[in-house]
Amino acid sequence: MNAHRKRGAIADLGRIMLILAVISIWVVPLWWTVITAIRPVSETLSLTPQWITRRPTWENFARAFELAPWGRYYLNTFQVVIGTFLIQMVTIIPAAYAFARLRFPGRDLLFYVLLVQLMLPAAALIFPNYTTIKTLGLVDTKIALMLPYAASAFGTFLLRQAFRTVPQELEDAALIDGCNWLGLVRHVYLPLIKPVFIAFALNSIIYHWNEFLWPLVVINSPGKRTLTLGLAMAFKSQETGFDWPLMTATLLIVIAPLLMLFVVFQRWFIRIYAQSGIKG
Amino acid sequence: MRAKKVLRPYLFILPAFIFLGLFTYWPVFKSVYYSFFRWNLFTPRRVFVGLDLYREVFQDPLTWKVLKNTFQLGLETIVPSIIIGMALALLLNRALRGISLFRLAVYYPSVLPTVALGAIWVFLFIPGYGLVPYYLEKLGFGQVRFLEDPRLALHAIAFVTVWKQAGYFMIFFLAGLQNIPPYLYEAALIEGAGAFQRFRYITFPLLKPISLFVVVMALIGSVQWVDQVFIMTQDAGPFNSTNILLFYIYQTAFQYWDLGKASVLTVIQVSILISGTLLAFRVFERGIYYERA
């Protein structure tokens, strides 16, 4: 019995060693970014890689903050991401409710028409969408960043599936109590599908936070840049004589808050990934 | 009153369908329509030319290079991401202390901006000085120039893409693994099945539905990997070695302002997406074991 347990412990140890070796492929790049960012510039002249630093410093971050108006870019990104999500709610919730609970001619066909969007990501349609945005006179506006994502087949599908699990009796009871449709959604449907709702919200926020190509096409004014756009521009303007301590500090300014959000909400991420997952 | 009741469901789905029409369906038709017109900096007013632009696009060697790159990048990202995602799931599907931290360590890149991750890898790939070439040289591989060598640049971008998304796919496979009833493994053990047989006859077939889902996701995702191309190489160079279709669309429309050609390329892109998705469904659905109640 004891020997058996011992063998199990050794197998576990072997597995942990293997796991550590494998995940180092993912951890090392992040470690290297952090260590370069907190290293004094004088130390970076070393020609052999230094895996730690003796004198951690904030000086690179101070320089990175002067490189571009990151606060502004955060605000812009925040507005776009929240705006996109709110518009999505306006289109998704009623449609998900209708497809889950109402009967009407053409329902299934229309649902399939909606699902085709899963095959046609907005990125593939940047050119025709740009012409539409131009016709609408919305080039170089934040609203233009939101509109192509306003309808989400993924979100509608996810919420429809969730709404269907809500017992019909609860809806009937709420309607008898004089609840209107908005009240019904607010007090019955959304509270009961909270995990799916939060999971979709996080998914939408992350996707649009990270988006790059569409903002690159639509936004011209430096003051309207999102974080990814600001980062790419700072990176591209550095091309010769790269100042990597500065650049890694800049990278961390952009990704650190997102990483922290991710660690705090990791439970929800896993849930959405487990439930279904095409980004939208 | 009656009419209102009949119309009500349609009013509910109207907002979604307005945007769906405006930014998904209409653009597809518009691209097809514009693809029949010469429309560029020298011909600012559209001129109908029939299929001329298609002929020109398909006669241009660059188009074929871009298409080859697109398929190569797709192949080099989809297949390894899925295999590695599945392997990671098998590796990390254990009740060990700290296992959630290990999972976190592998899938954090899937929530970060690709431009930021691409920049980190540019840093790690700097010839001579970057971490990867430095240790490769120590190991006797000589000077490796990942992003400057036209034979390596696309592979390097594929690698970074796999690195970014494998952990994301792992989560789906983990969910799939946790849905496999344990009694199947118990029965297999009683029958004397080895580890490989258990994987071959239980785990793998039962992961097929989730695999279809992951394949479709990877496929639709793969055409969108232009952020890496933008950040990691200059103008998809050297020699267009990392130019993929979506980047080429971006260049054609927004750098060269050849709008007719950009429409032709968009039509090609949409066709690839639709046929690829349908093909994935056909190939994979055949082998799927649905649990019958």
Image (cartoon, coloured by chain):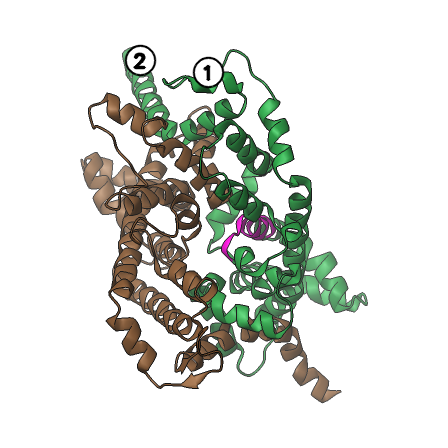
Chain colours: A green, B brown
Specify which label sits upstream in the sequence, 2 or 1: 2
Q: Are marks 2 and 1 on the same chain?
A: yes
Task: Decide which of A240, A50 is in the foreground and name it.
Answer: A240
Chain of residue at mark 1: A
Chain of residue at mark 2: A
Task: Decide which of A211, B154 is in the foreground and name it.
Answer: B154
| Main secondary structure along the magenta-highlighted residues | helix
Quarter occupied by residue B106 = top left
Q: Residue B98 — which label?
A: none
| Quadrant showing the C terminus of chain B | bottom left
Q: Residue A6 — which label?
A: 2
> Among all residues in the image, which is located at the extreme front?
B42
> Among all residues in the image, which is located at the extreme right?
A178
Quarter occupied by residue A46 = top left
Amino acid type shown at disc 2 = Lys
Q: Indicate the position of residue B58 as horizontal and vertical percent values.
A: 26, 72
* Residue drawn at (31%, 81%) of the image: B52
Q: Is residue A100 above or below residue B44?
A: above
* Residue drawn at (52%, 48%) of the image: A272
Is residue B288 at least partly visible in the picture? no
Amino acid type shown at disc 1 = Ile
Q: Is residue B44 left or right of residue B274?
A: right
Q: Indicate the position of residue A48 as horizontal and vertical percent values.
A: 36, 17
